[in-house]
Amino acid sequence: LRGIAFSAIVGCAAAFAPVAPTALRASGTPVALSARQSLFALPSRLASSAAFDGGMLLPRRNQRSGLSTLRLSGGAAAASSVEIQSKVAVAGGTLIRFSHESKSTQTPMTAAVFIPPGVEYNAEIPALYWLSGLTCTDENFSQKAGAFLHAAKAKIALVMPDTSPRGAGIDGEDETWDFGTGAGFYIDATAEPWSKNYKMYSYVTKELPALVEKEFSISPTLRSISGHSMGGHGALTIAFKDPEGWVSTSAFAPICNPTKVPWGEKAFTNYLGSVEKGAEHDASILLAKNGPFPKLGEILIDQGLEDNFLDAQLKPETLEEAAKAVGQPLLLRKRSGDHSYYFISTYIGEHISYHASRLRTKAAQVRAEARSSAPHTKRQPDPTTAAKPIVCKAMVAYGPKQPLKCEMITVDPPKRGEVRVKVIANALCHTDVYTWEGSDPEGKFPSILGHEAGAVVESVGEGVYDLKPGDHIVPCYTPQCNEAECIFCRSPKTNLCPKIRGTQGQGVMPDGTTRFSLNGEPIYHFMGCSTFSEYTVLAAISCAKVDQAAPLEKMCLLGCGVSTGWGAVWNTCKVENGASVAVFGCGAVGLSVIQAAKLSGARRIIAVDLNPNKFTAARAMGATDCVDASSVEGPIQNHIVGMTTWGVDYSFDCTGNTEVMRAALECAHRGWGTSCVIGVAASGKEISTRPFQLVTGRKWVGTAFGGWKSRSDVPQLVDRYMEGELEIDSYITHTFKGVEATNEAFDALHSGDCLRAVVVY
């Protein structure tokens, strides 16, 4: 079993760590960052999925998900239009309070956005807009509702505006609690003197969404709206006026029939000139006149039975009657509770779950539509080559540290249980270097290296029924036989299927022979993959069939390193929200560990490396702290324990250095810390520590391929990439054309600034 061997010590850090909004540079041009980009800024070399002209990150259409991605557009961009008032870590995410000059209200406005953990790579973040009630500011909901943990688990953002303009200077705006300041009623005033500033409908439905979409990547299409009391009235009427623009709506104790109650009569008379003009802002009237609204689905309303305003101001029965008359699904739950945030905090989790479910369904529809309409290359194999030898180019390794040589080799047809594939793209991994350098005790020469690839099935051998010519696959060095008698495949505890392990380690196929030859002489296989060849033969149980719409030149990274880092965090260690993490080694695997830890909501991620040049990438992926091990006096583990008092909850070695493995263990938290070995040490190396380190509660674990069961799990990772949930593109820092360019890719990998070099055949 192989992992990744790195020579440097590297590390990365943590969830939603605030990054100062310093400008990236493109061709020497300073680039202003949006508010969200300043939190999650990527260095330019990591933005490989974007078009880079020398400008700022802006949205563009993403063909894999149907949503928007970020691109770099030309020229110097305007600075962010919001001023950050505060950033608070909460529930693994970040609550950002900001202010801006509003064109709608012609006053400064303050609002807040909660960005949940695990959405850093989402091009657009689904969101729930919350509208608060009379007398409230943007902070009441934040401080009293207890919503953030629910939103974090659901992975949806929260957008929380103020309830009115403030400081407009209008006589009488501060005289009463139910009109003027704190009581904008989410309408656009048309009567003087309110018409100049009190434009809360335009602000909430147009200006604020445009602002948070630009600054925080809030989705313009995956959005729902809810609110309380006056805010419940606002949420319902806004959704009823634009049912195509909102996925769902709900409310707590809403003012359902404001033209018939004192609060509404007062607001409409003063803001609009008459109560009658308020009919177009009355939820019950709107529903009766224009309903039903099938796109909104079932409307959820919670009403407290002990609410002091129930009979005089809220009138939910009027909305219920209107819904029944037009056939609008409405769930009105009358429950024990009052009009306060005690009631809201009791049931806010159910409302967030309701909206999250609707938003997920909508997102799936968007993705399905995008996939069906997006062009993708259909690669059909040549049917005339089946059952015949194929002569093709391959890079042959003749001995340790000898340059690979491009040869015209013969690839035999697949035998029973095997498939022959055409390799489309191959990513170089340090495991290839590990064997090429002679550090691998199982290394065989001459051989064809390579194991991170994307390929298309050319032909199948006897007994292969779940793959056919034309299928897209990712070769996996860890097979999955799924046979009934395989206790490893049956067990959820491991992915280490031993079905072909014996022959794979000897550089041959399961029958003990090779499928490669040059001038009649056999050439050995490598890790059951050998993808430094235009064609290769694999055991069918080593092939993960993936979505044909997924780009194989990117999916190849899921064959080893990136998947391994993710799995070490999610499968092997199961890093939880709020955990502390240390990562030793900032190559591609270390960065993927950081990425996964950040997506898991780790509160602190410490990146450790000997090369401080790698810390830019580490911070971009989520590192909160970066430690240059070469500048630390004494053992690095002591330094990290000193940073954290008792050590980190989880540590990961991504170097293959046995001394670093020890350091990683010994910086794990006393009593419960877990240290995971990912990197593979050179032949003959052993690890050691004092038994006291284990007696005092630390655990030492290891992982191969991140614990993923290859044939069942890799396709799911591909789907998550296609859905925009996982980021891969940023790891590809170098691209080469043609199998003969593999030596150039090796040079790039050794250069120190390469994460993954992909060779497209």
Image: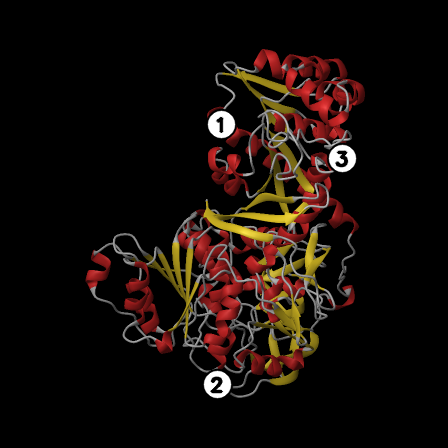
Q: Nearer the viewer, mark 1 or mark 3?
A: 1
Q: Give the left or right position of residue 576, taking residue 744 as reference.
A: left
Q: Position of residue 344 (x, y in %)?
A: 51, 27
Which callout, 1 or 3, points at the residue further toward the start of the chain?
3
At label 1, which amino acid type do we have? Answer: Tyr
Which residue is painted at 47% across and 46% down in the image?
A: 484
Among the 4 quarters of the image, the one containing residue 389: bottom right
Which residue is painted at 63% across and 57% down in the image?
A: 34
Q: Which mark is residue 400?
A: 2
Among the 4 quarters of the image, the one containing residue 80: bottom right
Camera-side residue of 691 and 131: 131
Which residue is painted at 75% across and 18% down in the image?
A: 275
**What crowding class fits label 2: few (fewer than 14 Cα within 10 Å), some (14-19), or many (20 or more)?**
some
Q: Nearer the viewer, mark 2 or mark 1?
A: 1
Q: Nearer the viewer, mark 3 or mark 2?
A: 3
* Secondary structure state at the residue bearing disc 2: loop
79 w.r.t. 515: above or below: above
Which residue was labeled with disc 3? 244
251 w.r.t. 618: above or below: above
* Secondary structure state at the residue bearing disc 1: helix
Give the CA separation, mark 3 to mark 2: 63 Å
Give the CA separation, mark 2 to mark 1: 69 Å
Q: Which mark is residue 341?
A: 1
- In the current view of this chain or complex, which residue is farthest to the front? 171
Position of the C terminus by quadrant: bottom right
* Secondary structure state at the residue bearing disc 3: loop
Residue 708 visible? The answer is: no
